[in-house]
Amino acid sequence: MKCVSCGCEISENAKFCPHCGAKQPKLSKKLVIGAAAVILAVGVVSAAGVFLSGNHKYVAYLKNNSVNQADLEHHKKETVEYSGDYGEEDNNPDAYVKVEYSKDGKYIFYPTEVTHEKNTVYPEYCLNMQKVGKEEDPIKLDNSVWQYHVLEQNKVLYIKSGNNTLYINDKKGNKEKIASHVEDYHIDKDEKNIVWIEAEDGSYAIYQQDLALKKEKKALAANVSFFDISENLKQIAVVEEDTLYVIRNFDDKKKIASHVSGIVSNSEQTGSICYIKVPDRVLTGADIVEDDCLESDVNIKEPYYDNYIVQRAEKNEYTGRYERVEAFDQDAYDQAWEQYEAKENRDKIREELKELELGSYMKELYCFRNGKEELVEKFYAEQVYDYGTEGKKNEVFAFNRYRMEEVPQIKMSEIESFSDLADLYYENLNNVKESCIYTEKKVITLSENLEYAVALEPEKKIGYGLKAETSEEEVTRTYTLMSFQIGESSDGSCKIVAENVDSIQMLTEGKIYYLTDVNESAGELYCNGEHVDSDVFVGSLENVKDGVAYAVDYDGNKGRATLKLYNGKENRKIADDVYAYHVFDEKNIAVLVNYSLDSKEGDLKYYRGKDKLLEIDEDVTAIFGGTVFYY
């Protein structure tokens, strides 16, 4: 995905931009989209708002401007309306306003008094806690909350707006402050420790504390420009200024390397860290331009008028005799000025070339493992991306690099402006670009340039990417979906999976779902070369056992579509006129149907693996945690 602040492409699961440090919204991870897939996404999905355990399948939804709940397993039970006004009528639930249940299903945590100021990403709300099924007044945990997480012990962590203060609160409403100016936090698997990030003067500081708050907080790092926290907090990599440190098990940090410009991967299982250095040597204008005009330009001077007055013989019309007269050679003068102005323009370009440095393209890939720093490879590249392999034993990531030894120098005579230089240079770079995969401690060069939407699945030792095909007129561009092997035995060869592909929609368990012939946000859905369905709405796929749920026949005027289910062999219809849906699994799906965009109300129904939908409630505004269609 792209950073919401600086626009740089970053890892799909990044919480902060490694380039500018901006915090990223917590969007759905279901799409694997690259630059080629200009997609109109469909809502956001999270587990919030549902609880599936044993005999209870709760779904939370908005009705009459209050949080309601239905017990789907016991659908004949009365629905519950929890106390408190949700907030502004037009402020429907999105990815940042959620309902959560405790792990044992005994408590519900829900928002009221929701407000969303203009030009802000995160809404604020009052966070409440109540026993499931109880309609009396809840315990009001706090107000002005914009992010929270429910712990196993029915405690809750949350951040309040203003000073971004992080609190922990128990089920009785007793809160304890952990820290202020908190941008994000991470919790280990056993919920014994918390690591959080504080913003300070353009950089970050990282702290740790036990969740029982029996010990003092520990400062792990300060003045941090880049960081990567492993899944279970056992290994934290940080860059302070340009020095890389590792923090293991919350001990004191240990220096790994200097002159580090970014962290690529961080595996607590193997203890390895891969990172990028930018060497002092940089590309300059002299490296990319051959000044084939320098010698001739020395002799070009500013033309003077008098120098173009010439003597020539002209016939006197009265005497009939030829006489010597002075005349001005306008053509020669104009030509001289044209040459001089071209020379002056080249001089200007020469001055600009002195300041031109392309250092960010020169990179050195290092890996720190077994206590040693190893240089993997030197190369030229724009960025190196970690494609979501954090916390796994496999260190696998992809990047594009340039074979700089094949880049021809640009002749000064071919340049008319400094912008022309940039265009020619990038054109030359694209001609020598190649895609690479780092896997099994080595770099593998792929046989095709897969510039777009690279999707990797290390467990299945397979990857996919889109190869761009441009027409001779450069008017249209199409994409070919290619596959390649990941692992020690890979030779980098790519195989064609499908042609004329518009976007990769999902990669899971070795199955690649993609769309072709996309028109008005819908296209033909395929899985591993097999046709699944037609008129499938872009981004609507939800993963289920052996297949996917997805939407077809989207009606933009009504905001509705038909929801279907594909089990790997055949598809079946779940419901028509679906506005929003939440997929528990292949046999449990909540749908909001017959929705009116004017009244913002519809009917909540329940699919439980049978043809007939069960009626749950009517006049429902939204499903918390549901997928909603929108442009």
Image (cartoon, rainbow, N blue to C red):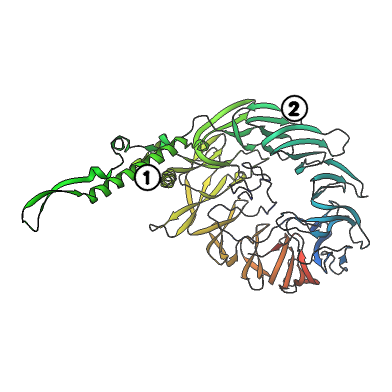
Q: Position of residue 346 (x, y in %)?
A: 37, 41
Quarter holding the C terminus? Answer: bottom right
- For label 2, the residue is 252
Horizontal side, residue 314 vs residue 475: left or right: left
Q: Is residue 571 above or below residue 340?
A: below
Residue type at mark 1 is Ile
Q: Is residue 407 visible?
A: no
Mark identifier at residue 112: none
Tag 1's secondary structure?
Answer: loop
Mark 2 is surrounded, within 10 Å at the Cα level, by few (under 14), some (14 to 19) or many (20 or more) other residues, namely some
Q: Nearer the viewer, residue 400 or 412?
A: 412
Give the residue at x 71% y 38%: 201
**Left or right of 111, for residue 335:** left
135 lies above or below 558: above
Q: Residue at x 69, y 26 (%)?
A: 254
Residue shown at the point (5%, 56%) measured from the top left: 320
Classify 10 Å Cα crowding around label 1: few (below 14), some (14-19), many (20 and above): some
Please tell me in which quadrant of the rendered image residue 72 appears: bottom right
In this rendering, is residue 426 above or below 62?
Answer: above
Secondary structure, mark 2, is loop
Q: Nearer the viewer, mark 2 or mark 1?
A: 1
Disc 2 marks which amino acid? Asp
Q: Position of residue 430 (x, y in %)?
A: 44, 46
Q: Is residue 545 visible?
A: yes
Mark 2 vs mark 1: which is more N-terminal?
2
Q: Is residue 202 left or right of residue 65?
A: left
Q: CA distance from mark 2 to mark 1?
A: 55 Å
Question: Where does label 1 land, which residue?
Answer: 415
